[in-house]
Amino acid sequence: MKPFLLLATRPEDAVADGEYELMLRYSGLRPEDLVRVRLEAGPMPDIDLGDLSGIIVGGSPFTGSVPESAKSDTQLRVEAELAALLDVVVAEDFPFLGACYGIGTLARHQGGEVDGTYAEPISAPVIELTDAGRDHPLCEGMQSRFRAFVGHKEAARTVPPGASLLATSENCPVQMFQVRDNLFATQFHPELDAPGILLRIDAYRLSGYFDPAEQELVEQAVEGVDARSANRLLANFVSIYRRS
């Protein structure tokens, strides 16, 4: 099988490794079938789409909607590299799944507006599939209403022009959308389970996603949440797009 590529940008080793392990667990892929590139650590290597089954972009501490002057050189480089890659990926309608940071990256590339209007603290809201989402093969086996983990300082205000809304929630209208036939993005984290979000809560307690004085309350609110419907999305993406 041709591998999938995970493009990651988390500088914290424990969080980055945890993200990779969760992507493996819920996609059903073996380590040799999910190649990870940590873009925060160095430039994006040359990528030949013909060698891959698909591309996954994980979450990030980067916030794309802040002024350019507030971005580090690393963030500016990563954004430019992802934009150039998406030029090719969108043109070829190549299988792509962006999670959290990935939804903002794809939305901006497609002319959507991304800002802090629908930011969400670390939590596990109820996500609802739209009619298009309920009928979509990517959502096969998922409940029409399910809980999933979120935590983001920006979000797409509306779906980009020409995109299809697949999932929404009360406080964040754009939770998942589709571009062309084979490009998808989620605001929620399809890879996360309760232990995974607890690791990130501790790692990012001083990063502005919640009041540090309320960390224990945030942890209590997500403990025991069943996110298996969200996790199913990763397995479905791999099942649909894996190729030899």
Image (cartoon, rainbow, N blue to C red):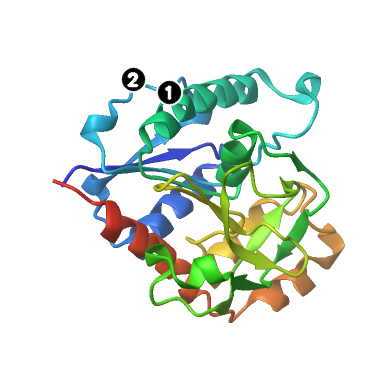
Do residues under tags 1 and 2 come within 8 Å of each other at their CB atoms? no
Report helix, strand or loop for mark 1. loop
Say which residue label 1 marks.
44
Q: Residue at x 46, y 19 (%)?
A: 43
Say which residue label 2 marks.
46
Instruction: Please tell me whether residue 229 is drawn above or below residue 53 in the rendered image.
Output: below
Judge by depth and name the residue closer to the eye, 1 or 41. 1
Judge by depth and name the residue closer to the eye, 211 or 159. 159
Where residue 224 appears, x then y in whole percent?
58, 81
Amino acid type at image mark 2: Asp
Amino acid type at image mark 1: Met
Q: Residue at x 26, y 37 (%)?
A: 52
Where residue 27 appears, x then y in whole percent?
34, 60
Q: For residue 193, say whether it is visible.
A: no
Tell me if mark 2 has few (under 14), some (14-19) or many (20+) residues whose alpha carbon lies within 10 angstroms of its own: few
Where residue 34 appears, x then y in whole percent?
30, 46
Task: Write down the quadrant of residue 93 in the picture.
Answer: top left
Tell me if mark 1 has few (under 14), some (14-19) or many (20+) residues whose alpha carbon lies within 10 angstroms of its own: some
Instruction: Please tell me whether residue 116 is drawn above or below residue 79 in the rendered image.
Output: below
Relative to residue 225, is residue 39 drawn left or right? left
Relative to residue 233, is residue 72 drawn left or right? right
Q: CA distance from mark 1 to mark 2?
A: 7 Å
Total numbered badges shown on the rendered structure: 2
Relative to residue 100, is residue 58 drawn left or right? left
Residue found farthest to the front:
162
Judge by depth and name the residue closer to the eye, 208 or 138. 138
Q: For residue 212, say whether it is visible.
A: yes
Where residue 244 appears, x then y in whole percent?
13, 46
Q: Residue at x 51, y 28 (%)?
A: 82
